[in-house]
Image: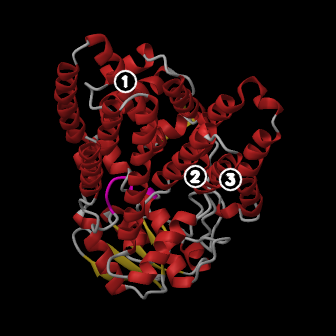
Amino acid sequence: MKTLKTALVSFILLLGIAVRLYNITAPLADYHSWRQVDTASTAKIFVEEGFNLLEPKYHDLSNTQSGLDNPNGYRMVEFPLYNAVFAFLYQQFNHFQIEFYGRLISILAYAVSAVIIFYLLNKELNFTTAVIGLLNFSFLPFMVFFTRVVLPEPTAMALGLTAVFFGYRFYKARTKRKAILFYTLSLICFAVAILVKPTAVFLGIILLYYFSRRYDIFVFTRPQFYLYFLLSIVPFILWRIHIAKYPEGIPASTWLLTSVQTSSGPQQIFFKPAFFYWIIFERITNLILGGLLVFYFIYGIIKNNSWFVRIFLISMTAYLLVFQGGNVQHEYYQTLIFPAVSIITAAGFYSFSKELKNKTLSILIFIILFGFSIYFSFVKVKGYYRIPPDLVSYSKIIEKVTEPNSNIVTDRNGDTTLLYLSNRKGSAVLIEDINKLKQYNYKYIVLTNKDKKQELIDKYSQNLKEVFTSDELTILEIL
């Protein structure tokens, strides 16, 4: 029986990895490519210019992110550990494009996270529920896509869950030696998780729960409790102190708490009905759970009395309520709630099947709802994999027409995908002042807007030379 269970779990994990390998070698121009290429860009420059983790750079030299001119292209966000790891893999093996290795690390992070989700559910509830949680995390299309992207979130999630796993083992440890070992491993993983993506700090709520389980009401009298959370945050604080020296490389971020960016400027969404609509209905209900599985999710919240489940719910809710703007603006922000959603939904199945008192029927109902939910979610998510052919063809033309070390400016409204694909530094926002372009050593203007092309040529006819033109693309050399 144990062998069959192991085989089933292994099969699900392998299949979960397999579905994430789809389009793994595709150019980095799929959904949210504008954010993915910023991550991959840093890795690419590590390979080209050396691994300086204290001064990460990327291809965007504009003031779009920080509001300050950034001629050195500094990228001062999360500590670039994830970027450095897949850059190193690319440097060592170099059989595919660099983004392949970034996706590969994210898929590995999925596998680590999936194993821990299964382990915790199996320990706290039962094997069948653990399999349900594993199925949710492995095959719901929205989760599949965002655990194979070139972003630090999947890695931070895996590190954070590993810290939770060791925190659980620390709580269960019966010898001092094991307690010290698991305490130390959990602390290291949690500190690194926060460095990789600071929002992983919300998993600390779960760790706080395991400390309280181990020490009961005496938890706040234990020095090791304070030491754990102090040491886990110190590397992040040191990193923030360091990057403060490079304000031009720090993107504006306060809006992530309360606002969304629109074509007419920032709009407040903090605790407004729109926030709850987007997060609860659009994201969790429709995109993540595919509509029908929300039944189990709600059931898990209302009916399950396990503090193990509640603490994941509390952690998830705290994260969503603090970063309201970021979670509405960017779908990838929901990556960090995937474990909680999977666990709560599985717990809902557990409670429902107990009340139904017919295990076979409860499994059959879940399979039907799960199947339809995957389909409904996939209908919306399948477009995320689409690679715009024009971007790829444009990048090849830019590489052929312009010199490798030349800076270019594009009219991509801040989307740096074209800069990354063409392997050119520059600005993704059109700068129309020819003197400023010369001041910052821009060599070419890349346009996809025909009207803007004629406008610039009429205005600066003596300073611009047309070096490539087609129905869709124009490249102007700045003289």
* Residue ID for mark 1: 297
Q: Amino acid at mark 1?
A: Phe
* Residue ID for mark 3: 184
Dot 1: element: helix
| Neighbours of disc 3 within 10 Å: few (<14), some (14-19), many (20+) | some
Residue in the picture at 43% in, 53% down: 112
| Neighbours of disc 2 within 10 Å: few (<14), some (14-19), many (20+) | many
Q: Is residue 415 above or below residue 224?
A: below
Q: Nearer the viewer, mark 2 or mark 3?
A: 3
Dot 2: element: loop
Q: Earlier in the sequence, mark 3 or mark 1?
A: 3
In the image: residue 390, left or right of residue 411: left
Indicate the quadrant where residue 346 lies.
top left
Q: Earlier in the sequence, mark 1 or mark 2?
A: 2
Residue in the picture at 45% in, 45% down: 116
Distance of label 3 from label 1 (alpha carbons): 34 Å
Q: Earlier in the sequence, mark 2 or mark 3?
A: 3
The stretch of residues the image draws in magenta is: 29-35
* Residue ID for mark 2: 197
Q: Amino acid at mark 3?
A: Thr
